Each structure stands twice: as structure tokens, then as C-alpha cells.
């Protein structure tokens, strides 16, 4: 048996349809036809390969146009047509009788695979000076049971989008129920229309366009805008207007709103660019798609896949329908995070809408409990269709509520001193019991530094050792410590804690850097880096994770975000001895009880941590904006480490102010956990 398979032939029709040529056998002719079929070259198939009788019955629009449209509409791909030709001498083929061949057709469609067998007839024809074999074609070549007058129909069943839950199965992105606000045209007054437009941030012209649709009747409800369930006050207000009503509507909801907005993101109507990008994945112009955050990152898992049925609707009244292919919808996954939504809400509330970011990790498991950016935005507003005016208002807001700060990196300021100390302790260049004699608030090594000076904010009794250096956040102490260890030791130590490498994390975050090129090129840059300035940038989650070495005796745990990820896996280890970790734990507690984080010195919780202020000065500026940090944990029960940064703290108490905000989170969380 000779076996003919798709795509092996490259055919030029001119070689197979000629007046003077070597005699062509029907199986060779069919092989050429099938190769074109597999390549979906229907125009050449029709023009050069189908019989005269076929062309009399089926015009170009019946064959070429219809087939091409069906292949596009039904997303037909991976077509594979094969046939077996019996062995035999060419004299076995009689030009007086049709040559019959069984073929096998396989393809993929939007409703699943289609596979069928068919018998093909080739007839010998003389066309002027041309003689050859031609295919008798019928619509059943497309699908079995399809006739010329029959219709091909498609129905789709949408999948249910998967939900995103927190560690306690509280909904973060859910399929909820909101409101569809609309009007009864016959009852809506002009005054009510104007008020409704203002309340819903619509235009009167838009409302008129909706009310003037062809199907509208004076007593019919005409939908105008969807609102989230959290906007019930607005719904109550507008439905007091004459002629305004509401109906319940299914929609995507984000119960924690702004507090989780940058993490969850939102879905919105797919645009032309996204539709093109996802071509072949079953999206239509009316679909919604993840636009930001986890909704976008997890789009493939959350979306699921729609069900579809392709069927033939036979011609004639009351005729039957024949299913060609059918696939059931597959709902999207429900995805559970390690996030504690209530703790995240506490952190977000404590930040009071000020620009900044915070993260919290479980130091034993690596689970991310908080990952927030402030201020946030209302994801429901974006999902339901944000107006151009509102979008512009948000983009012009100086606090940048649409900026995801937890994904960025910032100069960490003096929170870095704990890590610099750990590097010096491990390297043996820092003895915690020895100190430097430091006088005054400014210092420079020698005249070679020119105008460069190191400044500290507090004088303490000499000698200044590690404890005093951390408690009073002494820049001069850490400058001298850095010079003792040298740039190679500091760079190597920072790289051992994860600088200059991507965090092994499920959400894309900006990599923490030592400098713009990863090097330290001067003594000035060396001392700046030692206390978190210069070109050093740190991601807020990385900052919280690095402090695990103090609680885990030198070990950093791989951070996780999804509940199904393995927890407690070591990311970095051997960064600090148990003895040195205990020294740092004591010092960080005294930062609160003696040092600048005094708002955290409360009776009910033994908070320990480190403040940090990073000054951001432009060229030629004597003073710049300041970002304040506080990294903290409960020394008696270190269930989580929290790192928080607030921008622009120079006039509100610096990093001391941030320690007050973090303490508020610890207090509120303790109250929540008490029976």
C-alpha cells in the first residue's frame, strides 16, 4: 500500500495540469490535491483540481469563500489528511470509471478534535487540450453530513473565572454580585437625567444614546452603568431620582479594594492589541482579561477555557441538528495566597494613604503575609470601566496611586546597617566589643576626601561600639566599619544576602542592587553603601527577608506567595553565627527601648527592629526628600517581620514616625488574635 501524508509535497499546479505531459495517475493527482488541502490552499484546489460537474454545482463562493471562512471562524488548524492507494499497475486505472479512494481527515477546532473517514471520487476529463483526473467535491469534505444548503452553527459556554483567596480563604478577587443602574425612559425627567449623569460620571449625551436605541420602549429598563457592591451608597442615592432603577449583576469584585489593589490587579475589557496578542487562544472582542497584578500574571490559570459546540443545522423547517464537535467549559483555578488579608488591611490603614510600601514575612516559613503599596486604587472602578476624566485625575495625583511601590526598589537607609554589621561579624573585621573614638557630628578620613563628609545625628559616650552604632544609628561608626572591611568584603557579603540577583519569587520584583553597575568604585561610595545610601537600592520584600538572618541564626528562607508552594526552603545560609545573631537581636531591641524607635517601646509587645532614613538629593541640592523605614518583629513571638517605607517623612519625624505606624499594626494584630 502506498501511504500519502500531509505536507510532504510542494506542488505547482502548472506541472500537473498541462496539455502535453507524462500520463498522471489518479493516486498521484489525489496526493497533490491533499497536499494543497493540508496547506489550506483552497483557491488552487478549486481552480485546478475539482471536476467540471463540481464547478457547475458549487461556485467559488460555495467552495473557496465558505471553506476559508469556516476554517477561520471555527479556528481549524493542524489539518492532516491522509489516504492509502492500493498497489497496482497504472493500467489498472480505467479512464472510463471514477477512481475511488478512502481518505482520513483529522483537524483541531475551537470545539475540540474532529476526525472522519470519507471516500473520494476522481473522474478523468478532457478540457480542451488538457486531460487529467479531477476530484468530485461536496460539502461533506468539510464535515460529514454537511450539504450545500445546510448551516454550520457554533455555540459557546463561557468558563467561570477562578478566584484568588488569602491564606484564610477570604476572597481577594472573586466572582461577586454588583449593581446594574439604569433608567426607565418614560419616567426619567431631564433634571433627573442631568443629576444621574453627574453622579455616575457619564454624559447626558451618552445617556441619550442608550435611551434612543432601536429596541428601547418607554417602560423598559435600559442599563447605563455597572457599580460594585461596595458602591451601594451611590446606588441608593441615584435610585432616589425619578425613573432610575437598578438590577443585580454578576461581576468581578475585589473586597479589600485599595489595600490589595496592586497585588490583585484587575480585569477589564480586552482591547484590539490584546486580542491580537492572544490570537488562537479563544478570546473574543467581548471578553475580559487580566490587566494588572495577579489577574494579569495568572491570566492563563484564572481564565480557564470556554466550552464550545459546532453543529450542522440541516436545511428545512424542523430539520435535525448534528453535532460535529463539542467540548465542555473548564473553569479557572481557585488560587490561594500566603497573604493574610486582614493583616495587609491593617498595614495599609496604618500607612494612612501616604505614599509608601510595606511587606511582612513569616521568618520560619518564608510565607509572604503582607505586600502592599500605598496609596492604592479601587480595582472595581477599573474593572467596571473607568472614565477618561477619572483616569486623568488618578494619573495627575502627586501621590501616584497607580504606582506599584512594592515592586520597585529604594535606597534602604540605615536599615542596611544591620546587614552591614552581619557581614562584618561574619568576616571577622568587626568586633562587637570594640569601638571607635568619635567626636562631633561630622567626620572624614583625611583631606583626600575633599568636601565629602560623613554626618551623624547623635553623639554618645565613647567608645562607639556595635551596640551604640545600631541603637543611635551612627553613620560615622558604620563608615569606619566599612573602611575596615573594604569594598570586596562588603560586596561579597551583600551578594551572599541576595543583592545583584533576582529573588526566587513568584511575583516580578525589581532586583536589589549594590550600585548601578554592581561595583563600589571609591571610599565615599563604600561608606555610603554601608548605611544604605549611594546607589544602593533594595526591594521592600527583600529587606524584610534579609532580617530573617537575625532570627534564624544566619539563614534566609525562600519567600513564597502561593499556598501550594513548598515552605521553609533555605534560600541563603551561613550568613551569621548563632552567637552573633543573639548580639544583633539584643541590639535591635535596644533600638526600640533606648534609640530612635521609641514609639515602638510599648508594654504589651516587645518590638525590636531598626529605623532608617534615606535622603534623596538632586544635583546641587543641600537637602532632599527623605524616605523613612522601619523593620520590626515581636522579640517574644516573632510570627512575622514587617518592613515599611513612607515617602517624604522629613517634616513629620523621619523614620521615628514610621516606627509609630508599624507599632500600630502590631497592636491591632495582637487585638485580633486575642480571644
Image (cartoon, grey):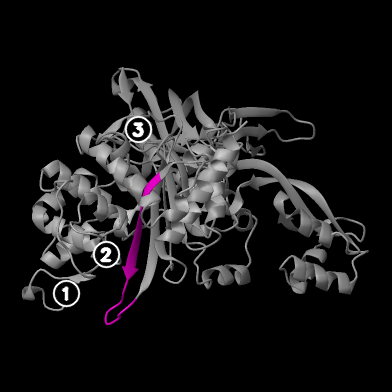
Identify whether 474 is placed above or below 577. Answer: below
Q: Is residue 8 visible?
A: yes
Front disc: 1 or 3: 1
Task: Name the residue furthest bottom.
Answer: 620
Q: Earlier in the sequence, mark 1 or mark 3?
A: 3
Q: Earlier in the sequence, mark 3 or mark 2?
A: 3
- Work out whether residue 196 or residue 102 is closer to the camera in this orientation and state it: 196
Q: Which quarter of the figure has residue 451? A: bottom left
Q: Which residue is mark 3?
A: 6
Q: Which residue is mark 2?
A: 459
Residue 27, how many percent across, how many down?
35, 28
- Work out whether residue 592 or residue 16 is closer to the camera in this orientation and state it: 592
Residue 616 located within the stretch drawn in magenta: yes
Range of magenta residues: 608-623
Q: Which residue is mark 1?
A: 452
Q: Name which residue lies at 34% across and 18% down.
A: 86
Q: Name which residue lies at 49% across and 25% down.
A: 115
- Label 2 secondary element: loop
Amino acid at each position: 500500500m502506498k501511504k500519502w501524508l500531509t505536507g510532504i509535497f510542494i506542488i505547482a499546479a502548472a506541472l500537473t495540469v498541462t496539455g502535453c505531459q507524462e500520463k498522471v495517475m489518479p493516486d498521484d493527482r489525489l496526493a497533490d490535491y491533499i497536499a494543497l488541502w493540508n496547506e489550506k490552499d483552497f483557491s488552487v484546489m478549486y481552480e485546478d483540481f475539482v471536476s467540471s460537474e463540481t464547478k457547475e454545482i458549487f461556485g467559488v463562493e460555495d467552495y473557496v469563500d465558505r471553506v476559508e471562512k469556516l476554517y477561520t471562524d471555527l479556528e481549524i488548524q493542524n489539518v492532516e489528511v491522509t489516504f492509502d492507494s492500493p498497489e497496482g499497475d497504472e493500467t489498472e486505472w480505467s479512464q472510463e470509471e471514477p477512481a475511488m479512494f478512502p481518505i482520513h481527515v483529522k483537524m483541531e477546532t475551537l470545539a475540540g478534535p474532529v476526525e472522519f473517514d470519507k471516500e473520494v471520487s476522481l473522474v478523468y476529463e478532457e478540457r480542451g487540450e488538457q486531460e487529467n483526473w479531477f476530484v468530485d467535491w461536496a460539502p461533506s469534505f468539510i464535515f460529514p453530513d454537511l450539504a450545500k444548503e445546510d448551516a454550520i452553527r457554533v455555540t459557546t459556554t463561557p468558563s467561570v473565572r477562578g478566584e484568588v483567596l488569602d491564606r484564610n480563604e477570604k476572597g481577594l478577587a472573586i466572582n461577586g454580585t454588583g449593581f446594574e443602574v439604569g433608567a426607565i425612559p418614560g419616567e426619567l425627567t431631564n433634571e433627573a437625567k442631568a443629576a444621574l449623569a453627574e453622579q455616575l460620571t457619564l454624559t447626558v449625551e451618552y445617556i441619550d444614546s442608550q435611551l434612543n436605541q432601536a429596541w428601547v420602549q418607554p417602560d423598559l429598563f435600559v442599563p447605563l452603568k455597572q457599580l460594585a457592591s461596595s458602591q451601594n451608597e451611590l446606588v441608593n442615592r441615584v435610585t432616589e431620582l425619578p425613573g432610575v432603577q437598578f438590577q443585580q449583576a454578576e461581576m468581578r469584585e475585589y473586597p479589600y479594594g485599595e489595600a490589595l489593589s496592586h497585588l490583585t490587579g484587575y480585569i477589564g475589557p480586552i482591547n484590539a492589541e490584546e486580542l491580537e496578542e492572544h490570537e488562537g487562544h479563544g478570546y473574543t472582542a467581548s471578553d475580559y482579561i487580566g490587566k494588572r497584578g495577579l489577574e494579569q500574571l495568572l491570566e492563563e490559570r484564572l481564565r480557564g477555557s470556554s466550552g464550545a459546540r459546532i453543529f450542522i443545522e440541516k436545511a428545512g423547517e424542523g430539520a435535525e441538528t448534528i453535532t460535529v464537535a463539542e467540548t465542555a467549559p473548564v473553569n479557572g483555578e481557585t488560587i490561594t495566597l500566603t497573604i493574610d488579608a486582614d493583616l495587609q488591611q491593617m498595614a495599609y490603614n496604618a500607612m494612612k494613604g501616604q505614599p509608601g510600601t510595606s511587606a511582612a514575612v513569616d521568618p520560619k516559613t518564608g510565607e509572604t503575609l503582607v505586600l502592599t503599596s500605598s496609596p492604592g486604587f479601587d480595582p472595581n472602578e477599573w474593572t467596571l470601566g473607568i472614565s477618561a476624566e477619572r483616569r486623568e485625575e488618578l494619573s495627575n495625583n502627586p501621590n501616584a496611586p497607580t504606582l506599584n511601590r512594592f515592586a520597585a526598589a529604594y535606597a534602604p537607609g540605615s536599615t542596611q546597617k544591620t546587614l552591614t554589621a552581619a557581614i562584618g561579624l561574619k568576616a571577622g573585621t568587626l568586633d562587637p566589643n570594640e569601638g571607635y573614638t568619635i567626636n562631633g557630628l561630622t567626620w572624614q578620613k583625611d583631606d583626600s576626601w575633599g568636601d565629602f563628609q560623613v554626618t551623624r545625628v547623635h553623639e554618645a559616650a565613647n567608645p562607639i561600639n556595635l551596640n551604640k552604632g545600631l541603637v543611635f544609628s551612627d553613620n560615622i561608626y558604620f563608615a569606619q566599619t566599612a573602611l575596615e572591611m573594604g569594598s570586596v568584603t562588603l560586596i561579597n557579603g551583600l551578594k551572599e544576602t541576595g543583592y545583584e540577583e533576582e529573588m526566587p519569587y513568584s511575583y516580578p520584583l525589581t532586583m536589589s542592587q549594590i550600585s548601578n553597575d554592581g561595583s563600589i568604585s571609591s571610599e565615599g561610595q563604600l561608606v555610603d553603601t554601608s548605611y544604605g545610601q549611594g546607589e544602593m537600592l533594595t526591594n521592600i520584600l527583600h529587606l524584610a527577608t534579609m532580617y530573617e538572618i537575625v532570627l534564624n541564626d544566619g539563614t534566609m528562607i525562600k519567600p513564597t506567595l502561593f499556598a501550594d508552594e513548598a515552605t521553609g526552603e533555605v534560600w541563603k545560609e551561613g550568613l551569621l553565627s548563632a552567637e552573633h545573631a543573639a548580639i544583633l537581636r539584643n541590639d535591635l531591641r535596644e533600638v526600640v527601648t533606648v534609640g530612635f524607635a521609641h514609639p515602638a517601646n510599648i508594654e504589651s509587645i516587645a518590638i525590636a527592629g531598626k529605623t532608617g532614613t534615606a535622603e534623596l538629593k538632586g544635583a546641587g541640592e543641600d537637602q532632599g526628600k527623605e524616605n523613612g523605614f522601619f523593620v520590626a518583629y515581636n522579640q517574644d513571638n516573632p510570627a512575622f517581620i514587617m518592613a515599611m517605607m513612607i515617602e517624604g517623612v522629613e517634616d513629620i519625624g523621619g523614620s521615628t514616625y514610621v516606627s509609630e505606624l508599624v507599632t500600630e499594626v502590631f497592636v491591632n494584630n495582637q487585638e485580633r488574635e486575642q480571644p
